[in-house]
Image: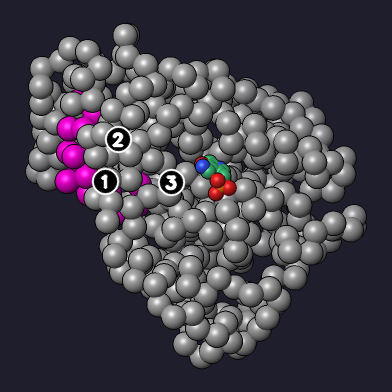
Amino acid sequence: MDRSLLMIPGPIEVEPEVLAALAAKPESHVSPAFIERFGRCLERLREVFRAPEGQPFVVAGSGTLAMELAAVNLIEPGDAVLVVNSGYFSDRYVRLLERCGAQVTQVRAPVGHAPALDEVAAALDRQPFKLLVATHVDTSTGVRVPAQELARLARERDVLSLFDGVCATAGERFEQGAWGADVYLTASQKAVGVPPGLALVMVGPRALAVRQARRAPLPSLYCDWLEWLPIMQAYEARRPAYFATPPVNLIAALAVSLEKLLGEGMEAVWARHARMAGAFRAAWQALGLRLVPESAEVAANTLSAIYYPDGVDGSLVGRIRDEGVIVAGGLHPEIRERYFRVGHMGAVRPNDVLATVGAVERALHAAGHKHAAGAGVAAAQGALVGGDE
Ligand code: PMP
């Protein structure tokens, strides 16, 4: 068994109980036990997303399917959409929306910055939009956008808002109901704490009403919310239903993970992510490394995006792997060769932080980067110990 530590921004290390659920014998998707499990999952998702009025959809597929599930239902050809673009996954949303026939306008931020709220407000005031789309945390830059304020700007103008939370949900605070965000979506393989394979979409009442009033035919069967709605409602009412076979083991694993998250409590889960991220940031600073996010305020709690120091190149990622920790290379096309990424979401604990920082330090040392041995580990440990006081 490989004992290396998986610290990429998804898939992530998952809890042993979650893995055990995946290894169980598949059960019938209409058995009483599965119906109960799935029904509870749907109820629990509302709590994790803080969306008391939301309609959850759990569908087999990756995060890109979650993005597609949202776009194809809401967009009719010609609809105007404002994309608050903070990186690679915002670019992906633009492509997807344009395929649905949307007229896309973008407010872009330079790499490492969150788009400015006054620019977003000005764009919203310039013309009517149906929908505002933002990536809560863009995995290519580690930048978190101010989702609450963006949802407010949209709501004030009667524009729907949609947030891609694939690299944020359950790791960053998001209160869908209270913030008035219409759609929040994620995938199972990140802070939700399950292997890849589930698209999770929470649809608020205004967005569902827009789908119900849609006039243009919807060209996808699998993505149609109205095909899935009676299925989700049936499972919640503890009745059997079938549209397309649910991935029963992944849903059993999700059930375990959601119980664990809610057992800890979302406030505590968000605080733990902030604490782990704080310890990582202390370490990067002590090692003299510069982050892609331009300030701590916009730096995500779910991953670190770190520039290689002078004289060090992408071979660092392999050196870190040789030290027992798997991290990711760059992704944003403008800076791809100049930085690497460390995921810190889900089951990450202080021991994982220290092991990861230690591996990065040894790899930097092997790459010729001069620093006092242990400086990063000491800074992380200081932050972790300080955080306990
Ligand atoms: N959005 C964001 C913010 C992501 O980080 C990812 C995956 N890294 C996706 C969308 C796409 O998810 P998937 O790779 O599961 O299709």
**Ligand 1 image-quadrant field:** top right
Q: CA distance from mark 2 to mark 3?
A: 16 Å
| Residue 98 locus on image (x, y percent) | 78, 37
Secondary-structure class at tag 1: loop
> Looking at the rendered structure, which numbered label has been put on residue 10?
3
Whether the residue under disc 3 has CB within 8 Å of ligand 1: yes
Looking at the picture, the colour scheme in use is one colour
Asked if residue 363 lies left or right of residue 75, the reply is: left
Q: Main secondary structure of the magenta part?
A: helix
Q: Is residue 376 above or below residue 383?
A: above
Q: Position of residue 3 (x, y in %)?
A: 24, 50
Under circle 2, the secondary element is helix
Residue at 47% over, 72% down: 249
Q: Quadrant of residue 325?
A: top left
**Magenta highlight range:** 345-361
Is residue 177 magenta-colored?
A: no
Query: Residue 4's mark?
Result: 1
Would you place residue 376 above or below residue 219 in this image?
above
Please say if the residues under marks 2 and 3 sit with CB atoms less than 8 Å apart.
no
355 and 295: which is toward the camera: 355
What secondary structure is found at the residue carrying circle 3? loop
Q: How many marks?
A: 3
Image: 379 above or below 179: above
Q: Residues within 10 Å of mark 2 (few under 14, many from 20)?
A: some
Q: Earlier in the sequence, mark 2 or mark 3?
A: 3
| Label 1 Cα neighbours within 10 Å, binned few <14 / some 14-19 / many ≥20 | few
Q: Is residue 350 magenta?
A: yes
Which residue carries the number 2 mark?
Answer: 321
Q: Residue 367: tell me if it is visible.
A: yes
Instruction: Please tell me which of labels 1 and 3 falls first in the chain.
Output: 1
* Front in this rendered view, residue 78 or 249: 249
